[in-house]
Amino acid sequence: MRLNSNRPGYFLACGITSLIALSYGGAALAAPVHGKAQVRLTHVFATLQTGEQDKKPEDVAACRKQVAAVDSRYLGVTVTTQYSIDAQTLIMSASSSLPSPVATKPLQLTIKLAPLGIAGQYAFGAFRPAALPNNFVLFSIGTDFKGANSSILVLNEGKDYNCLVSSDPNPFNSGLGEKFSAGQK
C-alpha cells in the first residue's frame, strides 16, 4: 500500500529530474564549440589577379617551385587552427599557426583570423597579416565541424599570377574561392 500512495510523488520526482537533465543537455548543445584542426598544405595552384585559377602549366610550375623554396616554403607544412564557434550567436574566432616559411628561421607563426561570413561553412581569413604581409591566410570548416581546409595565398608583386598552397584539392569550388581576389594588387 505504501508504494501506491507514493507513486505520484515518484512520477513527479522523475519528471522534474528529466526536465532538469533536458535543460542541461540543451545548454550543452548551445555552448560554443572549441576545436583544433591540423591540415597539411599539399596542393599548389596559380591564381590570376582576379582570383580565378590560372591554368597555364608554366605558371603552376613556377608556383610549385616558389612555394617549395627555402625562402618561401609552404608546400608540405602543417597548419594548425584553433577555433571557437557559437552556432547560436555566430560569435566566432580562430587563429592559425604554421612554421615560418623561411627555413632559416625556425619560428612558429600564429595568425589571428577574422570571420568571413560565407554561407554554408565557417570561414576565416587574414589578409596581409603583419607576420606574413605578402600573404592571405584562410581557413574553413563545415557547419558539422568536419572537412577543415587551410590555404595560403602568396602574393607576387610584379607578376600576373599569385601562388596558392592549399589542403583543399578544389579550392576554387569552395566559398573561399571568391576571397582569393580581395586586395591582391
Image (cartoon, rainbow, N blue to C red):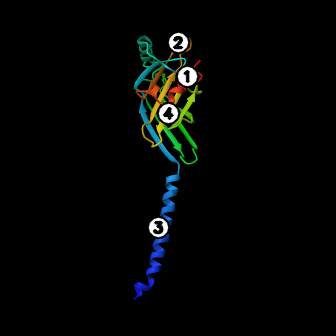
The answer to which of marks 3 and 4 sits earlier in the sequence is: 3
Residue with the mark numbered 2: 160
Label 3, label 1: how many angstroms apart (C-alpha)?
A: 53 Å
Tell me the residue at 57%/20% (across/down). 184
Pinpoint residue 123: horizontal percent, then vertical percent.
Answer: 52, 35
Give 32 or 117, whichever is nearer the viewer.
117
Q: Circle 3 — which element?
A: helix
Q: Are marks 3 and 1 in contact (CB under 8 Å)?
A: no
Q: Do residues under tags 2 and 4 come within 8 Å of each other at their CB atoms? A: no
Distance (Cα) linking label 4 and label 1:
16 Å
Give the residue displayed 50% in from the left and 66% down from the top. 19
On residue 139, the disc is 4
Amino acid, disc 2:
Asp
Query: x, y percentage for residue 129?
Result: 58, 27
Q: What secondary structure is marked by label 4?
A: strand
The label shown at residue 89 is: none
Is 138 in front, or is 38? 138
Mark 2–mark 3 distance (CA, rounded to whole Å): 64 Å
